[in-house]
Image (spheres, rainbow, N blue to C red):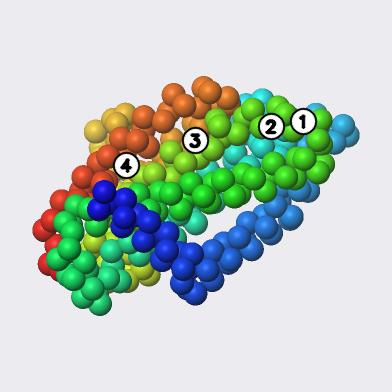
Amino acid sequence: MAALTIARLELFRLFGTKRGWIATIALLLIWSMVIRFVIYPAADLISSTETATFAGLILEWLGLAELSQWPSAEVSLYWMLSLYMLPFFCVVMAADQIASDKFRGTLRYITLRTSRTSVFFGRFLGQAFIQFLLVAITLASVIALVAWRAPDQLSEVLGSVPIVASNVFIVLLPYIALMSLVSVVAKSAIQAILFAIIAWILVLIVVAIVQSNFGPIEFLDWLLPGSQVSMLLKLSGWQTMQLAVIPLMQTGVLLTLGWFAMQRSDL
């Protein structure tokens, strides 16, 4: 129960503060520009009878022919863009789970009333719900675009919503867990983001060295969050859920490391 209370407070930190609203509005403005200047014209290009064949050949050449299996061009483009853009939004929004409270000393007072475990997992759950809202809002904007441009496709598009939303949300979970971990050892949100970037690069280098010296080791390919995205783009429909185990395992490992760091951390 304590973790759920802290999760609700995480929502208040976003929607009940000026800084939270500024960050939210900034991200929504960025996404509105993506809708207007990327998804809208690209969907026109893909859907046009004059260019549809050429666009299909390009997708096939890139190994992304499955994108054409989604019910509309708008959903296909959202599927591709969200898998790359929303993790960036996620890292920025989830960076300050523990860091600022720890640096100011307020975390010490919070843990007098509840356990470190409740604080750690409560903040993670709060951020997970925030990211779910982000997925819901961005996907709703695409549905609204479809309703305006091609209302005859709306029922089919609505049928794909659970598939797309659940997949994108699962992809975001390890990024939230990663920021939970680095936020424990960082002193600010910016430092947490820098730590995440450094950790990402170091793991990438180590994996490359190991793979080059000892041959391909399959499980090393799945160490980094988002490592399955290139494979996801080659699938459609409920087939995409067959890769869900990868981000869920990454989330479990990162949360375990973060929880351990939280227990050992000097508050």
Please, is residue 244 above or below residue 123 in the view? above
Name which residue lies at 30% across and 35% down.
249
- SS at circle 1: helix
User: Would you name the residue on which mark 2 appears?
Assistant: 157
Question: Mark 4 = which residue?
Answer: 251
Q: Residues within 10 Å of mark 2 (few under 14, many from 20)?
A: some
Nearest to the observer: residue 48 or residue 82: 82
Residue ID at (25%, 53%): 2
Q: Position of residue 193 (x, y in %)?
A: 37, 63
Q: Tell whether label 2 touches label 1 (CB within 8 Å).
A: yes
Question: Gap in Å between the C-alphas at discs 1 and 3?
Answer: 21 Å
Label ID, residue 166: 3
The dot on residue 127 is none
Question: Mark 3 or mark 4, which is nearer to you?
Answer: 3
Ranked by sequence position, the earlier of labels 1 and 4 is: 1
At horizontal 59% and vertical 50% (from top left) the residue drawn is 137
Q: CA distance from mark 2 to mark 3?
A: 15 Å
Residue wearing tag 1? 153
Percent of width and height locating residue 194:
35, 65
State left or right for residue 142 relative to residue 115. Answer: right
Q: How many marks?
A: 4
Of the two numbered discs 3 and 4 on the same chain, state the one appearing first in sequence: 3
| Left or right side of 81 for 1 | left
Question: Label 3 neighbourhood size at 10 Å, few (<14), some (14-19), many (20+)?
Answer: some
Q: Amino acid at mark 1?
A: Gln
Q: Real-space Cα distance between discs 1 and 2?
A: 6 Å
Q: Earlier in the sequence, mark 2 or mark 3?
A: 2
Q: CA distance from mark 3 to mark 4?
A: 15 Å
